[in-house]
Image (cartoon, helix red, strand yellow):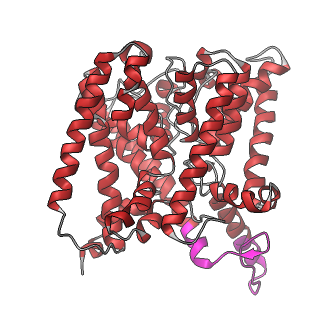
């Protein structure tokens, strides 16, 4: 927050800087109290404590991350909590209809920075710092690192967290430079790079990336959305083994293949009905496919007005999401591949009962525990979307599409949906109770359900 305050004088917003410093001071004071209270705590962190720390850390992000919005933009507490949770979970759902008019420069950069910090998980950052504080962080990394695997990363937790953040920061810096070359000023470039790499979707503009109407900007952002939705372990491996590691990875091939195929299909569908020439159809189809598949949520076109077939394909991508080990949400490509292979195996066993057909990813046999985890995650994802949709419909007088798309968009960490929560709409009209329900949906999706749901199992609290 203090760093965001430095932006104020550069953008003519000294008052915004003061508000940000006040917020930072309150957070620092609360942090010092927490440190003092826990000064004699046992340094060992087991799995139970790790889950509690993760839950408390993310709830704290919503509470303390919302302070700048309350102090600097006069948000209500529930609106501030919703916006902060949406930022840190990289969802990008907003209650702001007038972003440019409502926020000053320090608040803009803080709002976008929440995406960047939440991208790989603020708890992973804490893992790199915990050893210096005399606290072990092994279980925290495995609780917070997104996806079922962290392929190619270093085995030691501190080293792993450090490598993740160095790769993350380096790619962000490259995107900032390319966006500036494409025509953005440094402030817009930095903010949108934060949002892109976190696969978040917040923007400094009311109409998101569409406001720039710049093909070069859209190409750069599309490329980096796809990078952010890829397994970061592959980038670490590529430093040692070259770019071929991407082509050797089954999940990456499926991920890229789905993007290309869906982009072409949607471009064909909207050609003539929405856009009159091939270039525009490909331009908008590829950007919106990337932004939904990577669960970023930027907008260059209102796909709520696209043909139903194209909308259906995009909704399927909400469920699919990006790669394991990425900053994207959704079920994850590798899990969907595992689930489909497991279902295929069961179908084959239906007419060949003696068949032994383990699930394989390439030449690697997937352990049965991983198959079960993938199936469970997919099922809980769908159930959470369903329960969330029912609660939204119960709490607010909205149509069926709005209720379930709001739930899906928040659980998948995409942000924009369809109907009343479409790409050019926002979440401001929801009641405080619904905003809290959707905030919980974002947290469940970001932590992949079980880290939070375990807290509600009675046996978790038994010694």
Judge from the rendering whether residue 286 lies leftward or rightward of residue 194; answer left or right. Answer: right
Can residue 307 be seen in the rendering of this structure?
no
Label total for image:
0
Which quadrant of the structure image shows residue 354? bottom right
On screen, 26 above or below 214? Answer: below
Quarter that holds the C terminus: bottom left
Q: Quadrant of residue 259?
A: top right
Instruction: Provide the residue span drawn in magenta.
Output: 345-373
Q: Residue at x 78, y 19 (%)?
A: 280
| Quadrant showing the N terminus | top left
Viewer-nearest residue: 183 or 146: 183
Residue 60 lies within the magenta run:
no
Where is residue 120 shown, x and y percent of the image? 51, 51
Check if residue 351 falls in the magenta segment: yes
In the displayed orientation, state which residue is furthest to the bottom: 354
Using the image, determine if residue 411 lies above or below residue 450: above
Residue at 32% x, 17% y is 14
Return the x and y of residue 96 as percentages of the image width and height. 39, 22
**Horizontal placement of 337 versus 193: left or right?**
right
Which residue is pictured at 40% across the width and 59% down the height?
129
Q: Judge whether residue 160 can be spotted in this image.
A: yes
Residue 335 screen position, x and y as percent: 63, 61
């Amino acid at each position: 927050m203090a760093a965001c305050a430095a932006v104020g004088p550069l953008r003519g917003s000294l008052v915004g800087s003061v508000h940000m410093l006040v917020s930072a001071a309150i957070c620092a004071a609360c942090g010092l109290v927490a440190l003092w209270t826990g000064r004699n705590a046992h340094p060992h962190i087991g799995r139970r404590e790790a889950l509690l720390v993760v839950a408390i850390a993310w709830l704290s992000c919503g509470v303390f991350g919302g302070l700048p919005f309350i102090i600097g933009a006069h948000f209500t507490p529930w609106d501030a909590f919703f916006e902060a949770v949406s930022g840190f979970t990289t969802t990008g759902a907003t209650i702001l209809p007038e972003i440019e008019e409502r926020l000053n420069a320090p608040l803009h950069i803080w709002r976008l920075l929440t995406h960047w910090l939440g991208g790989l998980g603020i708890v992973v950052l804490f893992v790199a710092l915990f050893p210096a504080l005399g606290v072990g962080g092994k279980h925290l990394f495995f609780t917070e690192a997104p996806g079922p695997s962290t392929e190619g990363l270093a085995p030691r937790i501190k080293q792993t967290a450090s490598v993740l953040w160095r790769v993350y920061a380096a790619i962000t810096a490259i995107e900032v430079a390319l966006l500036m070359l494409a025509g953005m000023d440094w402030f817009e470039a930095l903010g949108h790079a934060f949002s892109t790499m976190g696969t978040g979707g917040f923007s400094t503009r009311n109409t998101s990336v569409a406001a720039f109407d710049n093909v070069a900007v859209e190409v750069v952002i599309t490329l980096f959305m796809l990078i952010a939705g890829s397994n970061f372990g592959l980038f670490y491996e590529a430093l040692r083994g070259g770019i071929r590691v991407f082509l050797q990875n089954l999940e990456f091939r499926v991920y890229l293949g789905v993007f290309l195929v869906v982009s072409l299909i949607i471009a064909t569908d909207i050609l003539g009905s929405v856009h009159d020439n091939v270039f525009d159809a490909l331009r908008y189809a590829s950007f919106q496919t990337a932004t939904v598949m990577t669960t970023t949520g930027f907008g260059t076109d209102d796909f709520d007005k696209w043909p139903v077939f194209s909308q259906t394909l995009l909704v399927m991508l909400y469920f699919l999401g990006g790669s394991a080990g990425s900053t994207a949400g959704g079920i994850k490509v590798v899990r969907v591949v595992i689930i489909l292979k497991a279902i295929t195996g069961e179908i084959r066993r239906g007419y060949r009962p003696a068949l032994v057909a383990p699930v394989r990813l390439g030449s690697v046999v997937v352990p049965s525990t991983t198959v079960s985890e993938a199936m469970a995650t997919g099922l809980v994802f769908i159930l959470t979307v369903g329960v969330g949709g029912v609660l939204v419909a119960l709490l607010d007088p909205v149509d069926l599409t709005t209720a379930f798309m709001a739930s899906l968009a928040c659980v998948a960490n995409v942000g924009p949906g369809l109907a009343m929560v479409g790409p050019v709409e926002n979440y401001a009209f929801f009641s405080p109770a619904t905003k809290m329900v959707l905030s919980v949906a974002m947290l469940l999706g970001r932590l992949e359900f079980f880290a939070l749901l375990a807290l509600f199992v009675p046996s978790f609290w038994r010694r």
